[in-house]
Every structure is written in C-alpha cells, then in structure tokens.
C-alpha cells in the first residue's frame, strides 16, 4: 500500500509538505502540496478524491481526528 501512495504523490510533480493516513476510509490519505493545497487520494482506485485550497503559505502539518472524519492543517499564515 505504501508504494501505491508514494507513486500517487510522486505523480503530482511538486513537493509534498505533509501526509496523513489515519482517515475513516483506510484506502484514502491526505497530501499537502507546496502550492498551499491539500489533496485527498484513494490508493485503491488511484484517483484524486478531493482538492482543497485556503492557506496562503505552505502547509506544515496535518492532524487527523481519532474518528478519521476530520482533519486540521497548519501553516504560518
């Protein structure tokens, strides 16, 4: 599973600044990109599930709630 996740992030072509794996759907993971975006991927289907933007600076960390339903990102902005 790790190699699938790595190849999905690698295909983005830009630096990844943070990752989170403990989501409600075990096949999904979050990847923060250097373009200030957060993307959710499904490792089973190898597809982008969602993309979000909102920070004005690089995302340094992603914290996932114990339920796996919510995530909080942090950045210098």
Image (cartoon, rainbow, N blue to C red):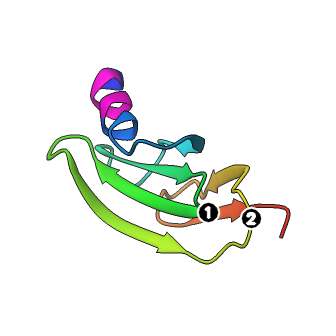
Q: Foreground residue, 66 or 13?
A: 13
Asked if residue 33 is among those painted magenta in the image, a careful observer would answer no
Asked if residue 6 is among those painted magenta in the image, a careful observer would answer yes
Secondary structure of residue under mark 1: loop
Which of the 4 quarters of the picture holds residue 9? top left
Assess disc 1: are there few (<14), some (14-19) or many (≥20) residues with their C-alpha within 10 Å of its C-alpha.
some
From the top left corner, tell me how far across and down residue 21 is, in percent.
47, 42
Mark 2 or mark 1: whose residue is earlier in sequence: 1
Q: Which residues are magenta?
A: 3-7
From the top left corner, tell me how far across and down residue 77 is, in percent.
83, 70
Q: Which disc number belongs to residue 36?
A: 1
- The residue positioned 48% from the left and 56% from the top of the image is 68
- The residue positioned 32% from the left and 52% from the top of the image is 41
Q: Which residue of the protein is positioned furthest toward the right in this rendering?
A: 76
Q: Give the quadrant of the N terminus.
A: top left
Number of residue marks: 2
Secondary structure of residue under mark 2: loop
Q: Which disc number belongs to residue 54?
A: none
Vertical placement of 40 versus 13: above or below?
below
Which of the 4 quarters of the picture holds residue 18? top right
Instruction: Answer left or right for 12 relative to 27.
Output: right
Vertical placement of 36 versus 16: above or below?
below
């Amino acid at each position: 599973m790790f190699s699938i996740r790595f190849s999905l992030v690698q295909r983005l072509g830009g630096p990844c600044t943070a990752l989170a794996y403990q989501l409600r759907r075990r096949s999904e993971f979050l990847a923060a990109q250097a373009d200030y975006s957060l993307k959710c991927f499904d490792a089973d289907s190898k597809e982008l599930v969602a993309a979000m933007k909102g920070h004005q600076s690089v995302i340094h960390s992603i914290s996932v709630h114990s339920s796996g339903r919510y995530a909080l990102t942090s950045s210098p902005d």
